[in-house]
Image (spheres, rainbow, N blue to C red):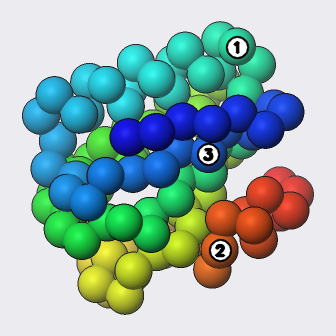
């Protein structure tokens, strides 16, 4: 996972495998720290994601909940087709804001 700041937005580049475990704690801690630093919008760059399980989905849902509880928002960008299908099956495609590219996500407003 890599994080870069652009003003009050952070772009979090996700790893190829989202399975929870230690990376879940790392993501949770990072999201909390970002909100404490004044980040209002987190863009998750999903370009590299090849595999995701229910724990990985849970990581993203927890991040969304943390952001919303602190007045922030998040966008899933460049979501691969398999991940997009999983989001549709679980109806999370209506919960998360989705964007075709990171650039598009950076220009979105609320």
Image position, residue 2 (x, y; %): 46, 39
Residue under label 3, please give it: 11
Q: Earlier in the sequence, mark 2 or mark 1?
A: 1
Mark sitting earlier along the chain (3/1): 3
Under circle 2, the secondary element is loop
Gap between marks 2 and 1 measured at Cα: 25 Å
Give the quadrant of residue 53: bottom left
| Relative height, residue 21 to residue 19 (above, below) | above
Q: Nearer the viewer, residue 100 or 63?
A: 100
* Left or right, 29 with reference to 39: left
Q: Is residue 97 left or right of residue 5?
A: left
Quadrant for the N terminus in the image: top left
Q: Position of residue 62 (x, y in %)?
A: 38, 38
Q: Earlier in the sequence, mark 2 or mark 3?
A: 3
Instruction: Say which residue appears at 62% left-offset and 51% top-offset.
Output: 43
- Residue at which label 1 appears: 37
């Amino acid at each position: 996972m890599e994080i870069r700041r652009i003003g009050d937005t952070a772009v979090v580049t996700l790893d190829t495998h989202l399975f929870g475990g230690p990376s879940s704690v790392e993501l949770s801690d990072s999201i909390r720290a970002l909100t404490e630093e004044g980040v209002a919008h987190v863009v998750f760059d999903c370009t590299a994601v090849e595999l995701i399980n229910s724990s990985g989905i849970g990581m993203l849902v927890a991040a969304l909940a943390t952001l919303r509880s602190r007045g922030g928002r998040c966008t899933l960008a460049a979501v691969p087709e398999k991940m997009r299908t999983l989001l549709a099956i679980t109806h999370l495609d209506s919960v998360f804001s989705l964007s075709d590219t990171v650039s598009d996500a950076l220009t979105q407003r609320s």
